[in-house]
Amino acid sequence: MKKHILLFTITVMGMGMIFGSPKVSALESETTNAVAETTKAATETTKAVAETTKTETKTTTRAVEKETKPQMIKDFEKTTVNINKITLVSKKKIKLQWDKVEGATGYLIYRKTDEGNYIKIATVKNADINEYTNKNLKYGNTYIYTIKAYKDYNGKTYFSSYKRDGYTKVLKVKKKKIGQYHYLYDMDKQKIENVQNFLDNPKYCIKVNILASVVTIYAKDGTKRYTIPVKAYLCSGNIYDTCGTFKLGVKYRFRGLYYNCHSQWASRIHGDILFHTVPYKKSQNPTSLDIKQYNLLGTPASHGCIRLQCAASKWINDNCPIGTKVIFYKDQNPGPLGKPKLEKLKSWHTWDPTDPTMKEKCKEHNCKHTEI
């Protein structure tokens, strides 16, 4: 009997232990939740500290970058690019020229119209280039330009300042009479040099001043008179040439001359008298120029023909049709456009620097010639 009571007691106690376990689990759960909440709070605190540290790091980095930015970069960013010249090239083109910025890698060209915003129209990646021609414009419009310089340094690109109100140019010209001649000027009162690009269906007259050794091209002014000076070229004629009025005749790409000489872009004036280039020693060989005769341009030196530089002879050949009026006269006054200067050639320069077919030859020798 005692044994049975003992067993029952143990069993009940065991059951009590079994039934009592849920209360213990709830307490543990509450403790666990409290720990979880504490852990969560600690995690959020850690995140907040991390964000604060990140922000402080960024701020510190920026401050360090600002402090460590080289003075030359600071000076570069303050620089403003100066456009020193804006030229009207034709009814559709404007040429910009600017002062180079020391240390620049290149330049960014911006343009806007009267009421528009600036847009980037070009990037000049060569720092040695300080000019740009803006094409496909509309005649009569006003254009505003500004330029930024940029500099690549230590893997980053820095930009200069720029003139916010820009540089304004109106693509329009007007005719002005001075004495007996008419000249073209832009709206900034700058004289137009490339007059032919602003003339509609021009008709020309060629006047050869034998005494001054200058050929001047004139365009018709809307009447029967040729009063618009277009171009002036150096020439070599002969003081005994006959004065008078003639008409341009047949043209030649290459032409043999007397005394076993040769020429390019020849145009007959009358009889055996031609416009042609300075003589070459070999036929159709533009690298066989007679340098001695070339260096005499601007003085009477021919046997009667009118010698010209290649650019001049070709211009007449291309722009003056057969029948164009040619006038020979003698005067000490070279003409309304004056007398151009000649850049004399050295003995090794056996080609005409104005010859368009010889541009690569001049590039090979790094020649720096003035265009005519």
Image (tube, rainbow, N blue to C red):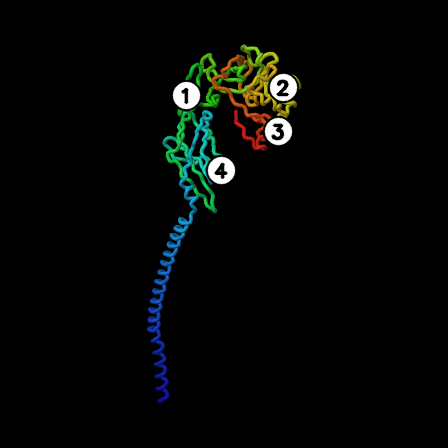
- Identify residue for label 1: 174
Residue 158 visible in the picture: yes
Q: Amino acid at mark 4?
A: Ala
* Mark 2: amino acid: Arg
The vertical placement of 367 against 335, above or below, is below
Which residue is identified by label 3? 348
| Mark pair 3, 1: CA separation | 45 Å
The CA distance from mark 2 to mark 3 is 24 Å
Binning the other alpha carbons within 10 Å of mark 3 as few (below 14), some (14 to 19) or many (20 upward) gives few
Residue at x 48% of width, y 36% of height: 124
Q: Which residue is mark 4?
A: 127
Q: Earlier in the sequence, mark 2 or mark 3?
A: 2
The amino acid type, in three-letter code, at marker 1 is Lys
Disc 2 designates what residue? 255
**Do callouts 1 and 2 mark residues in contact (Cβ within 8 Å)?**
no
Q: Of marks 4 and 1, which one's residue comes earlier in the chain? A: 4
Of 287 and 324, nearer the camera is 287
